[in-house]
Image: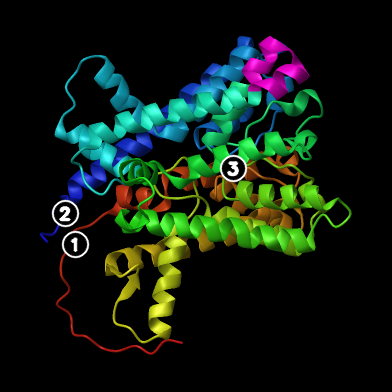
Amino acid sequence: MSKQKRKPVSQSRHSFRVIITGFFLLILCGALILMLPVSSRSRTVTPFSDTLFTAVSATCVTGLIVQDTATHWSLFGQAVILGLIQIGGMGVITIGLAITRLSGKKVGLWQRSIMQDSISAPQVGGILHLTKFILRTSAAIELTGAALLCPVFCRDFGIAKGLWYALFHSVSAFCNAGFDLMGVREKFSSLTSYGGNVYVSTVIMLLIIIGGIGFLTWDDIAEHKHHFKKYRLQSKIVLTATGILIFLPALLFFFTEYQDEPAAERIMHALFQSVTARTAGFNSADLSQMHESGQSVMTVLMLIGGCSGSTAGGMKTSTVAVLLLAALSVFRRRNDVQCFRRRIPEEAVRSAGAILFMYVVLFLSTGIAISMIESLPLITCLFETGSALGTAGLTLGITTSLSLTSHIILMCLMFAGRVGGLTLIYAAIASGNTPSKLPLEKVTVG
Protein backbone atom coordinates (compact mmCIF):
# COMPACT_ATOMS: atom_id res chain seq x y z
CA MET A 1 0.00 0.00 0.00
CA SER A 2 1.44 3.34 -1.00
CA LYS A 3 1.78 6.03 1.60
CA GLN A 4 -0.37 9.13 1.33
CA LYS A 5 1.62 12.11 0.14
CA ARG A 6 2.13 14.64 2.90
CA LYS A 7 1.05 18.20 2.30
CA PRO A 8 3.71 20.91 2.13
CA VAL A 9 4.03 22.65 5.50
CA SER A 10 3.38 26.10 4.02
CA GLN A 11 0.17 24.86 2.39
CA SER A 12 -1.11 23.31 5.63
CA ARG A 13 -0.24 26.43 7.59
CA HIS A 14 -2.11 28.58 5.08
CA SER A 15 -5.17 26.31 5.29
CA PHE A 16 -5.27 26.61 9.08
CA ARG A 17 -4.98 30.40 8.85
CA VAL A 18 -7.88 30.55 6.41
CA ILE A 19 -10.02 28.44 8.77
CA ILE A 20 -9.19 30.68 11.75
CA THR A 21 -9.80 33.86 9.76
CA GLY A 22 -13.14 32.54 8.54
CA PHE A 23 -14.37 31.86 12.07
CA PHE A 24 -13.07 35.21 13.30
CA LEU A 25 -14.83 37.20 10.55
CA LEU A 26 -18.08 35.28 11.08
CA ILE A 27 -17.97 36.06 14.81
CA LEU A 28 -17.27 39.75 14.19
CA CYS A 29 -20.10 40.09 11.65
CA GLY A 30 -22.48 38.27 13.96
CA ALA A 31 -21.58 40.49 16.91
CA LEU A 32 -22.12 43.67 14.87
CA ILE A 33 -25.50 42.49 13.54
CA LEU A 34 -26.64 41.56 17.06
CA MET A 35 -25.83 45.12 18.15
CA LEU A 36 -28.55 46.48 15.86
CA PRO A 37 -31.70 47.62 17.70
CA VAL A 38 -33.79 45.25 15.57
CA SER A 39 -31.92 42.29 17.12
CA SER A 40 -33.26 42.91 20.64
CA ARG A 41 -36.81 42.77 21.92
CA SER A 42 -36.46 46.20 23.52
CA ARG A 43 -35.27 47.66 20.18
CA THR A 44 -32.19 49.09 21.89
CA VAL A 45 -28.48 48.62 21.18
CA THR A 46 -27.01 45.66 23.07
CA PRO A 47 -23.47 46.33 24.40
CA PHE A 48 -20.73 45.00 22.13
CA SER A 49 -19.26 42.91 24.95
CA ASP A 50 -22.56 40.99 25.23
CA THR A 51 -23.06 40.58 21.48
CA LEU A 52 -19.47 39.45 21.01
CA PHE A 53 -19.82 36.84 23.76
CA THR A 54 -23.08 35.63 22.21
CA ALA A 55 -21.59 35.50 18.70
CA VAL A 56 -18.53 33.58 19.91
CA SER A 57 -20.71 31.13 21.82
CA ALA A 58 -23.06 30.59 18.86
CA THR A 59 -20.35 30.31 16.19
CA CYS A 60 -18.29 27.99 18.38
CA VAL A 61 -21.49 26.01 19.14
CA THR A 62 -20.98 26.32 22.87
CA GLY A 63 -24.16 27.62 24.51
CA LEU A 64 -22.80 29.84 27.27
CA ILE A 65 -24.84 33.05 27.33
CA VAL A 66 -24.92 36.38 29.13
CA GLN A 67 -28.38 37.34 27.83
CA ASP A 68 -31.32 34.93 27.84
CA THR A 69 -31.90 33.94 24.21
CA ALA A 70 -35.71 33.89 24.40
CA THR A 71 -36.36 37.05 26.40
CA HIS A 72 -33.59 39.41 25.27
CA TRP A 73 -33.32 38.74 21.53
CA SER A 74 -36.05 39.45 19.00
CA LEU A 75 -37.09 36.95 16.33
CA PHE A 76 -34.52 38.56 14.03
CA GLY A 77 -31.82 38.27 16.69
CA GLN A 78 -32.72 34.63 17.33
CA ALA A 79 -32.52 33.96 13.58
CA VAL A 80 -29.04 35.54 13.48
CA ILE A 81 -27.96 33.34 16.38
CA LEU A 82 -29.39 30.26 14.65
CA GLY A 83 -27.50 31.18 11.47
CA LEU A 84 -24.25 31.47 13.42
CA ILE A 85 -24.92 28.07 15.01
CA GLN A 86 -25.61 26.46 11.65
CA ILE A 87 -22.53 27.89 9.94
CA GLY A 88 -20.31 27.29 12.96
CA GLY A 89 -21.58 23.74 13.39
CA MET A 90 -21.07 22.61 9.81
CA GLY A 91 -17.95 24.74 9.42
CA VAL A 92 -17.26 28.07 7.77
CA ILE A 93 -15.28 26.40 4.99
CA THR A 94 -18.06 23.87 4.28
CA ILE A 95 -20.63 26.65 3.83
CA GLY A 96 -18.17 28.71 1.77
CA LEU A 97 -17.49 25.78 -0.53
CA ALA A 98 -21.21 25.16 -0.93
CA ILE A 99 -21.80 28.80 -1.89
CA THR A 100 -18.95 28.58 -4.41
CA ARG A 101 -20.53 25.52 -5.99
CA LEU A 102 -24.00 27.09 -6.11
CA SER A 103 -22.61 30.20 -7.79
CA GLY A 104 -21.27 28.02 -10.58
CA LYS A 105 -17.60 28.75 -9.89
CA LYS A 106 -15.01 26.02 -10.20
CA VAL A 107 -13.59 24.65 -6.97
CA GLY A 108 -9.82 24.40 -7.28
CA LEU A 109 -7.33 22.16 -5.52
CA TRP A 110 -6.53 24.92 -3.00
CA GLN A 111 -10.16 25.17 -1.85
CA ARG A 112 -10.43 21.38 -1.67
CA SER A 113 -7.27 21.20 0.42
CA ILE A 114 -8.65 23.73 2.91
CA MET A 115 -11.89 21.77 3.12
CA GLN A 116 -9.89 18.62 3.85
CA ASP A 117 -8.18 20.31 6.81
CA SER A 118 -11.45 21.84 7.98
CA ILE A 119 -13.30 18.53 8.44
CA SER A 120 -10.23 16.33 9.09
CA ALA A 121 -10.88 14.27 5.95
CA PRO A 122 -8.32 11.50 5.28
CA GLN A 123 -7.71 12.63 1.68
CA VAL A 124 -8.54 15.46 -0.69
CA GLY A 125 -10.04 13.10 -3.26
CA GLY A 126 -13.84 13.00 -3.14
CA ILE A 127 -14.03 16.10 -0.97
CA LEU A 128 -16.81 17.68 -3.08
CA HIS A 129 -18.92 14.52 -2.78
CA LEU A 130 -18.34 14.57 0.98
CA THR A 131 -19.34 18.25 1.18
CA LYS A 132 -22.59 17.53 -0.66
CA PHE A 133 -23.22 14.59 1.67
CA ILE A 134 -22.63 16.81 4.74
CA LEU A 135 -25.08 19.47 3.54
CA ARG A 136 -27.81 17.04 2.51
CA THR A 137 -27.48 14.89 5.61
CA SER A 138 -27.47 17.88 7.95
CA ALA A 139 -30.58 19.37 6.34
CA ALA A 140 -32.41 16.02 6.40
CA ILE A 141 -31.59 15.32 10.05
CA GLU A 142 -32.41 18.83 11.25
CA LEU A 143 -35.75 18.90 9.41
CA THR A 144 -36.61 15.43 10.71
CA GLY A 145 -35.76 16.53 14.24
CA ALA A 146 -37.91 19.64 13.84
CA ALA A 147 -40.82 17.55 12.55
CA LEU A 148 -40.55 15.23 15.55
CA LEU A 149 -40.49 18.15 18.01
CA CYS A 150 -43.33 20.03 16.31
CA PRO A 151 -46.28 18.20 17.95
CA VAL A 152 -45.07 18.97 21.48
CA PHE A 153 -43.94 22.56 20.89
CA CYS A 154 -47.00 23.47 18.77
CA ARG A 155 -49.20 22.14 21.58
CA ASP A 156 -47.33 24.16 24.20
CA PHE A 157 -46.61 27.41 22.31
CA GLY A 158 -49.06 27.59 19.42
CA ILE A 159 -48.51 26.68 15.78
CA ALA A 160 -46.33 29.60 14.60
CA LYS A 161 -44.10 29.77 17.67
CA GLY A 162 -44.09 25.98 17.98
CA LEU A 163 -42.74 25.56 14.45
CA TRP A 164 -39.98 28.09 15.14
CA TYR A 165 -39.12 26.49 18.48
CA ALA A 166 -38.98 23.03 16.89
CA LEU A 167 -36.60 24.19 14.14
CA PHE A 168 -34.43 26.24 16.51
CA HIS A 169 -33.96 23.42 19.03
CA SER A 170 -33.43 20.80 16.33
CA VAL A 171 -30.60 22.79 14.72
CA SER A 172 -29.16 23.71 18.12
CA ALA A 173 -29.16 20.08 19.25
CA PHE A 174 -27.73 18.66 16.01
CA CYS A 175 -24.98 21.28 15.99
CA ASN A 176 -24.30 20.54 19.69
CA ALA A 177 -24.82 24.24 20.46
CA GLY A 178 -27.07 24.13 23.52
CA PHE A 179 -28.92 27.39 22.80
CA ASP A 180 -32.59 27.23 23.80
CA LEU A 181 -35.72 29.38 23.83
CA MET A 182 -37.21 28.10 27.08
CA GLY A 183 -36.47 31.35 28.87
CA VAL A 184 -40.08 32.29 28.16
CA ARG A 185 -40.93 30.01 31.07
CA GLU A 186 -37.95 30.76 33.28
CA LYS A 187 -34.77 32.60 32.33
CA PHE A 188 -31.69 30.44 31.74
CA SER A 189 -33.72 27.29 32.49
CA SER A 190 -32.59 25.29 29.42
CA LEU A 191 -34.75 22.15 28.99
CA THR A 192 -35.49 21.58 32.67
CA SER A 193 -39.22 22.06 32.03
CA TYR A 194 -39.06 19.00 29.73
CA GLY A 195 -36.81 16.96 32.03
CA GLY A 196 -39.54 14.42 32.65
CA ASN A 197 -40.72 14.32 29.02
CA VAL A 198 -39.28 11.09 27.60
CA TYR A 199 -40.25 11.96 24.02
CA VAL A 200 -38.60 15.40 23.87
CA SER A 201 -35.53 14.23 25.80
CA THR A 202 -35.06 11.25 23.48
CA VAL A 203 -35.34 13.34 20.30
CA ILE A 204 -32.85 15.90 21.62
CA MET A 205 -30.43 13.18 22.72
CA LEU A 206 -30.55 11.47 19.32
CA LEU A 207 -29.87 14.76 17.54
CA ILE A 208 -26.91 15.44 19.84
CA ILE A 209 -25.44 11.97 19.31
CA ILE A 210 -25.91 12.07 15.53
CA GLY A 211 -24.27 15.49 15.28
CA GLY A 212 -21.47 14.54 17.65
CA ILE A 213 -20.48 11.32 15.88
CA GLY A 214 -19.14 13.19 12.87
CA PHE A 215 -19.80 13.41 9.16
CA LEU A 216 -16.99 11.04 8.19
CA THR A 217 -18.48 8.31 10.36
CA TRP A 218 -21.93 8.83 8.89
CA ASP A 219 -20.43 8.68 5.40
CA ASP A 220 -18.89 5.35 6.39
CA ILE A 221 -22.23 4.11 7.72
CA ALA A 222 -24.04 5.26 4.57
CA GLU A 223 -21.54 3.40 2.38
CA HIS A 224 -21.16 0.15 4.33
CA LYS A 225 -24.48 0.06 6.19
CA HIS A 226 -24.37 -2.45 9.09
CA HIS A 227 -21.11 -4.12 7.99
CA PHE A 228 -19.03 -2.91 10.92
CA LYS A 229 -15.91 -4.79 9.81
CA LYS A 230 -15.74 -2.73 6.61
CA TYR A 231 -15.69 0.61 8.46
CA ARG A 232 -12.55 2.69 8.64
CA LEU A 233 -10.59 2.37 11.87
CA GLN A 234 -11.58 5.96 12.70
CA SER A 235 -15.28 5.08 12.54
CA LYS A 236 -14.84 1.94 14.63
CA ILE A 237 -13.03 3.89 17.36
CA VAL A 238 -15.59 6.72 17.25
CA LEU A 239 -18.63 4.43 17.59
CA THR A 240 -17.07 2.29 20.31
CA ALA A 241 -15.82 5.25 22.34
CA THR A 242 -19.16 7.08 21.98
CA GLY A 243 -21.09 4.11 23.30
CA ILE A 244 -18.79 3.71 26.29
CA LEU A 245 -18.81 7.44 27.10
CA ILE A 246 -22.61 7.51 27.06
CA PHE A 247 -23.50 4.45 29.12
CA LEU A 248 -20.77 4.33 31.76
CA PRO A 249 -21.32 7.91 33.02
CA ALA A 250 -25.09 7.34 32.76
CA LEU A 251 -24.78 4.38 35.13
CA LEU A 252 -22.75 6.50 37.52
CA PHE A 253 -25.28 9.35 37.44
CA PHE A 254 -28.17 6.92 37.91
CA PHE A 255 -26.75 5.44 41.11
CA THR A 256 -25.35 8.66 42.59
CA GLU A 257 -27.67 11.49 41.50
CA TYR A 258 -31.40 12.26 41.41
CA GLN A 259 -32.13 9.82 44.26
CA ASP A 260 -35.44 11.49 45.19
CA GLU A 261 -36.97 11.04 41.73
CA PRO A 262 -38.87 8.06 40.27
CA ALA A 263 -36.73 5.42 38.51
CA ALA A 264 -37.99 6.35 35.03
CA GLU A 265 -37.05 10.01 35.46
CA ARG A 266 -33.69 9.06 37.00
CA ILE A 267 -32.90 6.99 33.91
CA MET A 268 -33.77 9.86 31.58
CA HIS A 269 -31.85 12.43 33.62
CA ALA A 270 -28.80 10.14 33.83
CA LEU A 271 -28.78 9.44 30.09
CA PHE A 272 -29.48 13.05 29.15
CA GLN A 273 -26.71 14.49 31.32
CA SER A 274 -24.26 11.88 30.02
CA VAL A 275 -25.10 12.72 26.40
CA THR A 276 -25.33 16.50 26.73
CA ALA A 277 -22.12 16.86 28.77
CA ARG A 278 -19.98 16.07 25.74
CA THR A 279 -20.40 19.53 24.12
CA ALA A 280 -24.19 19.80 23.68
CA GLY A 281 -24.97 22.30 26.44
CA PHE A 282 -28.58 21.47 27.25
CA ASN A 283 -29.54 20.32 30.71
CA SER A 284 -32.73 18.66 31.92
CA ALA A 285 -32.02 19.10 35.65
CA ASP A 286 -30.46 21.69 37.95
CA LEU A 287 -26.71 21.03 37.71
CA SER A 288 -25.98 22.99 40.88
CA GLN A 289 -27.85 20.29 42.83
CA MET A 290 -25.45 17.57 41.72
CA HIS A 291 -22.72 16.28 44.00
CA GLU A 292 -19.20 17.54 43.40
CA SER A 293 -18.25 14.06 42.19
CA GLY A 294 -20.98 14.22 39.53
CA GLN A 295 -19.96 17.73 38.51
CA SER A 296 -16.35 16.56 38.22
CA VAL A 297 -17.36 13.66 35.96
CA MET A 298 -19.33 16.08 33.78
CA THR A 299 -16.29 18.37 33.58
CA VAL A 300 -14.18 15.47 32.28
CA LEU A 301 -16.88 14.58 29.74
CA MET A 302 -17.03 18.20 28.56
CA LEU A 303 -13.27 18.25 28.01
CA ILE A 304 -13.40 15.00 26.03
CA GLY A 305 -16.14 16.36 23.79
CA GLY A 306 -17.44 14.79 20.60
CA CYS A 307 -15.76 13.20 17.60
CA SER A 308 -13.40 14.52 14.96
CA GLY A 309 -15.05 16.04 11.90
CA SER A 310 -18.32 16.62 13.78
CA THR A 311 -20.28 19.62 15.01
CA ALA A 312 -18.87 19.04 18.51
CA GLY A 313 -15.76 20.43 20.20
CA GLY A 314 -13.47 19.19 22.95
CA MET A 315 -10.36 17.01 22.81
CA LYS A 316 -12.40 14.47 20.79
CA THR A 317 -13.19 10.87 21.62
CA SER A 318 -10.57 9.51 19.22
CA THR A 319 -7.86 11.49 21.04
CA VAL A 320 -8.74 9.90 24.37
CA ALA A 321 -9.09 6.47 22.76
CA VAL A 322 -5.64 6.71 21.16
CA LEU A 323 -4.07 7.73 24.48
CA LEU A 324 -5.77 4.83 26.27
CA LEU A 325 -4.63 2.40 23.58
CA ALA A 326 -1.09 3.79 23.82
CA ALA A 327 -1.11 3.20 27.58
CA LEU A 328 -2.36 -0.36 27.07
CA SER A 329 0.41 -1.02 24.56
CA VAL A 330 2.97 0.08 27.16
CA PHE A 331 1.38 -2.12 29.82
CA ARG A 332 1.46 -5.10 27.45
CA ARG A 333 4.99 -4.23 26.24
CA ARG A 334 3.96 -3.99 22.61
CA ASN A 335 6.01 -2.00 20.14
CA ASP A 336 2.96 -0.68 18.28
CA VAL A 337 -0.34 0.85 19.32
CA GLN A 338 -3.03 -1.49 18.01
CA CYS A 339 -6.81 -1.43 17.67
CA PHE A 340 -9.20 -3.67 15.68
CA ARG A 341 -6.20 -5.51 14.20
CA ARG A 342 -4.71 -2.30 12.83
CA ARG A 343 -1.67 -0.24 13.85
CA ILE A 344 -2.14 3.39 14.81
CA PRO A 345 0.57 5.74 13.45
CA GLU A 346 3.06 7.09 15.96
CA GLU A 347 2.28 10.60 14.73
CA ALA A 348 -1.33 10.21 15.91
CA VAL A 349 -0.14 9.15 19.37
CA ARG A 350 2.18 12.16 19.64
CA SER A 351 -0.57 14.53 18.50
CA ALA A 352 -3.00 13.03 21.01
CA GLY A 353 -0.49 13.54 23.81
CA ALA A 354 0.09 17.14 22.77
CA ILE A 355 -3.66 17.83 22.65
CA LEU A 356 -4.18 16.37 26.12
CA PHE A 357 -1.32 18.41 27.57
CA MET A 358 -2.59 21.60 25.93
CA TYR A 359 -6.18 21.11 27.10
CA VAL A 360 -5.17 20.30 30.67
CA VAL A 361 -2.90 23.37 30.89
CA LEU A 362 -5.56 25.69 29.45
CA PHE A 363 -8.31 24.17 31.58
CA LEU A 364 -6.44 24.41 34.88
CA SER A 365 -4.69 27.75 34.34
CA THR A 366 -7.83 29.59 33.22
CA GLY A 367 -9.94 27.98 35.93
CA ILE A 368 -7.47 29.10 38.60
CA ALA A 369 -7.30 32.58 37.03
CA ILE A 370 -11.09 33.03 37.06
CA SER A 371 -11.29 31.70 40.62
CA MET A 372 -8.75 34.31 41.73
CA ILE A 373 -10.38 37.14 39.76
CA GLU A 374 -13.94 36.42 40.88
CA SER A 375 -13.22 34.94 44.35
CA LEU A 376 -15.33 31.88 43.51
CA PRO A 377 -14.83 28.18 44.43
CA LEU A 378 -12.25 26.54 42.19
CA ILE A 379 -14.43 23.57 41.21
CA THR A 380 -17.16 25.96 40.02
CA CYS A 381 -14.68 27.90 37.89
CA LEU A 382 -13.12 24.70 36.51
CA PHE A 383 -16.60 23.55 35.49
CA GLU A 384 -17.02 26.85 33.61
CA THR A 385 -13.64 26.70 31.85
CA GLY A 386 -14.12 23.03 31.01
CA SER A 387 -17.49 23.90 29.53
CA ALA A 388 -16.02 26.73 27.42
CA LEU A 389 -12.96 24.80 26.25
CA GLY A 390 -15.03 21.73 25.44
CA THR A 391 -17.68 23.97 23.80
CA ALA A 392 -20.27 22.30 26.01
CA GLY A 393 -22.14 25.37 27.23
CA LEU A 394 -23.15 23.94 30.61
CA THR A 395 -22.82 26.19 33.63
CA LEU A 396 -23.39 26.19 37.36
CA GLY A 397 -25.02 29.61 37.04
CA ILE A 398 -22.04 31.97 37.22
CA THR A 399 -21.68 33.05 33.57
CA THR A 400 -23.84 36.16 33.75
CA SER A 401 -22.20 37.41 36.96
CA LEU A 402 -18.60 37.17 35.75
CA SER A 403 -16.51 40.24 34.97
CA LEU A 404 -15.44 41.34 31.49
CA THR A 405 -11.96 39.87 32.06
CA SER A 406 -13.42 36.44 32.82
CA HIS A 407 -15.73 36.72 29.81
CA ILE A 408 -12.74 37.41 27.57
CA ILE A 409 -11.01 34.33 28.98
CA LEU A 410 -14.10 32.23 28.27
CA MET A 411 -14.38 33.61 24.72
CA CYS A 412 -10.77 32.67 24.00
CA LEU A 413 -11.40 29.18 25.36
CA MET A 414 -14.55 28.75 23.24
CA PHE A 415 -12.70 29.85 20.12
CA ALA A 416 -9.77 27.52 20.82
CA GLY A 417 -12.12 24.65 21.62
CA ARG A 418 -14.06 24.97 18.35
CA VAL A 419 -11.24 25.80 15.96
CA GLY A 420 -8.87 23.36 17.66
CA GLY A 421 -5.81 24.09 19.72
CA LEU A 422 -3.46 22.37 17.31
CA THR A 423 -4.95 24.35 14.43
CA LEU A 424 -4.04 27.58 16.23
CA ILE A 425 -0.52 26.34 16.95
CA TYR A 426 0.07 25.01 13.43
CA ALA A 427 -1.20 28.26 11.93
CA ALA A 428 1.27 30.25 14.00
CA ILE A 429 4.40 28.16 14.38
CA ALA A 430 4.20 25.17 12.05
CA SER A 431 7.64 24.04 10.95
CA GLY A 432 9.07 21.50 8.57
CA ASN A 433 9.09 17.78 9.34
CA THR A 434 12.85 17.39 9.16
CA PRO A 435 14.39 14.12 10.42
CA SER A 436 16.44 14.41 13.60
CA LYS A 437 20.14 13.56 13.31
CA LEU A 438 21.06 14.21 16.91
CA PRO A 439 22.54 11.44 19.07
CA LEU A 440 19.96 9.18 20.76
CA GLU A 441 20.02 8.86 24.54
CA LYS A 442 17.51 7.13 26.83
CA VAL A 443 15.52 9.03 29.45
CA THR A 444 13.85 7.24 32.37
CA VAL A 445 10.16 8.06 32.93
CA GLY A 446 7.62 6.77 35.43
Q: Tell me if label 1 and label 2 are in contact, CB under 8 Å.
A: yes
Q: Nearer the viewer, residue 243 or 280?
A: 243
Apparent side of residue 224 relative to residue 37 in the rendered image (left or right): left
Residue 177 appears at what percent x and percent y?
57, 36
Per the model, the C-alpha gap separating discs 1 and 2 is 10 Å
What crowding class fits label 2: few (fewer than 14 Cα within 10 Å), some (14-19), or many (20 or more)?
few
Amino acid type, label 1:
Asn
Residue 418 appears at what percent x and percent y?
47, 43
Amino acid type, label 3:
Ala
The stretch of residues the image draws in magenta is: 150-165
> Furthest-right residue in view?
260
Q: Where does label 1 land, which residue?
A: 433
- The mark that comes first in sequence, 3 or 2, is 2
Residue 361 appears at what percent x and percent y?
52, 62
State the SS at label 2: loop
Labelled disc at residue 6: 2
- The mark that comes first in sequence, 3 or 1, is 3
Queried whether the magenta region covers residue 162, the answer comes back as yes
Q: Tell me if label 3 and label 1 are in contact, CB under 8 Å.
A: no
Per the model, the C-alpha gap separating discs 3 and 1 is 36 Å
State the SS at label 3: loop
What crowding class fits label 3: few (fewer than 14 Cα within 10 Å), some (14-19), or many (20 or more)?
many
